[in-house]
Image (cartoon, rainbow, N blue to C red):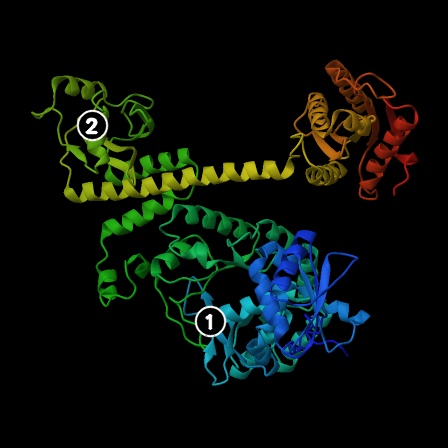
Amino acid sequence: MSQICPISKTCACRNVTRCRTKEAGRLFLWFPVPHTLKKVTSYLQEFALEYELMHERPGLSLDCRPGQSLNIACNLAKLLAPRELKETQVLFIRGAIQPQLHDFSDIASLQRFIKFNQSDWLVEMLATERFTSYFQPIVSIKDTSQIFGYESLLRGLDKQGNLLLPGPILELATEAGLLPQLDQAARLSAIAQFSRHQVSGHIFINFVPTALYDPIFCLRSTVEAIDQAGISHERVVFEVVESDNLQDLDHLKTVVKYYRDAGFLVALDDLGSGYSSLNLLHQLRPDFIKLDIGLITNVHQDPYKASITEKLLEITQKLNIQTVAEGIECIEELNWLRERGATFAQGYLIAKPSAVPVTTTPHFDPIALTVASANSPLVEQQVQHQSESERIVAAVTQRIRQSLELDEILQTTAAEVRQLFEVDRVVIYQFEPDWSGLVAVESLAEGCISIQGYIMDTCLQPSRAAYFQQGNTRAIEDIESPGLSPCHVDFLRSMQIRAYLIVPILQQERLWGLLIAHQCHHARQWQQSEINLFNQLAGQTAIAIQQSELYHQLQQANQELQRLACSDGLTQVANRRCFDDTFKAQWQHLAREQGSLSLILCDVDYFKLYNDTHGHLAGDDALRQVAKAISQTVKYPADLVARYGGEEFAVILPNTDMEGAIAVARDIQTNLNALQIPHPHSHVSEFITLSLGVATITPHSQLSPATLIAAADQGLYQAKAQGRNCVVQMECEDANVR
């Protein structure tokens, strides 16, 4: 065998081949473009290295002394751009023989070739199986002393038996093409160690989808190890990692199906990191999702994280998916997640990873979770003497934050505060950027007049706003007492106000508005404890408002991303992906409703001649005008105009019979003719025209959606055969589904 330094592309996950490029041999290099070849030959000539060019494609080969191939490769890496490094292909053959057919399966990128040649220590570690597993408990978030299971975490061992963290190991294995071997070693180590310790509960085992070429072959040894260890399949949870870099969703679904068919559970790891998508929930439908540590850290203080995590928890609860919050390091994070319905907790607050799985974990009582620090020796004492006001703030805050809709937040705040302080009226005054503003919401006791929508106080000018922006409060026990200006007293009387308390609603340095309590019928002496509590509630209201604003900004951004993802970049109508999704959804809906579904396929006549004559820029502009003309004909929100491909467009018309669809097709022709886009080389008109195929069907479960598409497509074909610039309707019964 001439095979010396393979980067394995087989499913032989346990086959670890040592690289022998330190021996003499011949190095073959193929380059992505001639420019890369020129850079490399200049380097070789500079150092008087002889080489032989290839004539079929940009490439060369050269003889190397022992160890020289890696040295040349590393020097070339300094010359080439990152993309050139990835796209330059390498094959090393030991000795002086020519490569054989089987050798070409060992061709690798220059980047991988270098990394593999630098991975002797990892290859040795794999060959000698110097790995172990640590275990971190996953506990019930309601009762953290109840252990549900353990996540297995890979650790390497050097020759002296010292631990090596997984980060550098995973990074090198990925770059050197050794991830399949490492992934299997991690799975088998986890199973062996878990079995040895004889602990109860579930075991969470990570796996990398891209490391599995054939799930039936690659995972056979894993299933056999589980069975030999006597671990029941329902106790094993396989975690999908690397979900931020999924290249092949169908492959991942095949792997997950294999696990499920074998009776295992599936978790989606690190949701909220990288490019992980909510779409994976729909595609994989996991039993668990693990919320990434990046979301969990300081979630109780970060409104962005809070808004996102709350919605994720809400979604998973509706879908009956259990959640594991990773990386919990403080009591405040645990408390926040517990209040919002997370299922399980994991993190250093509970227990650190250990070689021997822990069998007891601390119990954190819900009351203790409001204490500022879990590590303070005064925790128990502080819990026992927790003030009534803190419990009140926590209870009111929870009710305020039950919604992310601003109106509901403000109305709940006003109602809760009025009931708590037993005042006659509570209003929330909102400022505009120019310091104008009005009463946004109010909560009234019986017998009080409404002032919602009013400008509260003509004295609230920028100078007064600056006073509140500094965090100051204002408490007036009786407006009849000396000190207020006569005009101010008259204004307050007109609003039926006898005493009031005002505190600012501050978002960091931004004065959003004011939280105001009114006593309408008698004076009131405001206690300092009341003022402090009022301030705390205003602070919580400010956080809730900011979360609402950020949530809606996030919604708008997501809607814009969704629009862009479903929109054709050139014509701004729907793209093919959107067409496929909409067509499928309408088919399923109308199959239930037994309604008509019509489809129009349109093709611009002799568009290639138009492009050849006027150029592609003019062609693009023409397609935009055609798309606009078609879009102007649809009348109902459910109708969809899409670019089907190239110069072809499609129109989906739900609940539209053949007569209605023909009318729409005629309107499309009329709108396009009105534009009179010149097309002197067309064989049917001096202007751009369309050929259209129309078909209608009543969907049902025994029919394929392809039936309707095939019928419209054949109608379009016949329209072209009949001379173009016409509409042809096709009965679905006459269509041939291809």
Residue 734 image offset from top left, x and y in percent: 92, 35
CB of mark 2 within 8 Å of CB of mark 1? Answer: no
Tally the numbered discs: 2
Image quadrant in which the N terminus is located: bottom right
Residue 39 falls left or right of residue 598: left
User: Vertical placement of 21 versus 330: above or below?
Assistant: below
In the rendered image, is residue 234 in sight?
no
Tell me the amino acid under the disc marked 2: Arg
Residue indicated by mark 1: 136
Q: Is residue 351 above or below residue 313?
A: below
Q: Amino acid at mark 1?
A: Gln
Farthest residue, direction bottom: 160
Task: Say left or right for 710 vs 623.
Answer: right
Circle 2 — which element?
Answer: helix
Estimate the x, y position of residue 68 in percent, counting from the top left: 62, 73
- Left or right, residue 730 beside residue 275: right
Q: Which residue is mark 2?
A: 464
